[in-house]
Image (tube, rainbow, N blue to C red):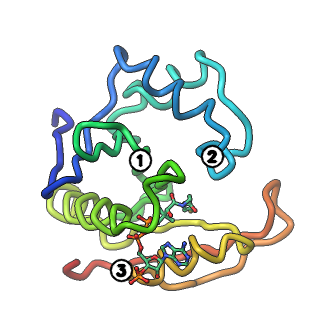
Amino acid sequence: MDPQVLEDGRVRLRPTSVGDLAMARGLFTDPGFYEHWDGAPKADAEIVEKYLGARRPGVECFFVEVDGSVVGFTQYHAADDGDQGGGMDLVLLPQARGQGIGTAVVRLLVGHIQRTLLWCRITVDPEVDNERGVTFWSRVGFVRTRLVDGDERPPYWLMERRSHPI
Ligand SMILES: CC(C)(COP(=O)(O)OP(=O)(O)OC[C@H]1O[C@@H](n2cnc3c(N)ncnc32)[C@H](O)[C@@H]1OP(=O)(O)O)[C@@H](O)C(=O)NCCC(=O)NCCS
């Protein structure tokens, strides 16, 4: 199925494509963005390989647009454990935070996933130190299921949202 634009009022999720390298580079080399997305700026080759549609349909990536400007990035990815589920990630630029945009993004993306993929669970993995992130995911319906420590990353919460209307 072709990726589709998802929108609700001011907030629009636009699927990325190969022509979007300059726009994506602007996000993935901005410290306010990448501090929450792997912690370092990304080279063009990795952006093209991972974030501009090449991993479709297992991974779907979207720019978050508000009033026509790109203010963040979100993606969902199917789990490879054969279960009916997967994970999502979301980072907004600092100036776009705290205005309800993240809540609108989750509502759009979770609604789309539930309608089209019929997943019964969606997971997120905020770092324990990211209290704002953990609070946010709780507010939009995710519950902490496991603390993961000793991994390659700093400790993080595995949080899960089971299928129910958003
Ligand atoms: C986390 C993030 C996606 C939330 O999106 P947002 O648009 O800022 O969140 P919203 O405005 O929709 O707020 C929803 C709830 O999240 C929590 N929240 C949002 N910003 C917060 C802040 N600065 N401090 C504490 N809680 C906050 C609140 O509970 C809020 O509900 P309320 O407004 O009723 O109090 C966004 O702030 C962001 O990109 N942060 C940096 C990246 C990140 O942490 N991503 C998640 C990592 S897994």
The residue carrying mark 2 is 32
Q: Which mark is residue 75?
A: 1
The residue carrying mark 3 is 162
Could you tell me the amino acid type at mark 1?
Answer: Gln
Secondary structure of the residue carrying numbered label 1: strand
29, above or below 164, in the image: above
17, above or below 163, in the image: above
Q: Residues within 10 Å of mark 3 (few under 14, many from 20)?
A: some
Image point (60%, 23%), residue name = 46
- Residue 142 in the image, given as x and y percentages of width and height: 44, 80
Q: Residues within 10 Å of mark 2 (few under 14, many from 20)?
A: some
Q: Hey, which residue is sitting farthest right in the picture?
A: 150
3D distance between C-alphas at marks 2 and 3: 30 Å
**Nearer to the camera, 129 or 155:** 129
**Nearer to the camera, 98 or 22:** 98
Q: Earlier in the sequence, mark 2 or mark 3?
A: 2
Could you tell me the amino acid type at mark 3?
Answer: Arg
11, above or below 16, in the image: below
Q: Nearer the viewer, mark 1 or mark 2?
A: 2
Quarter of the image with the C terminus is: bottom left
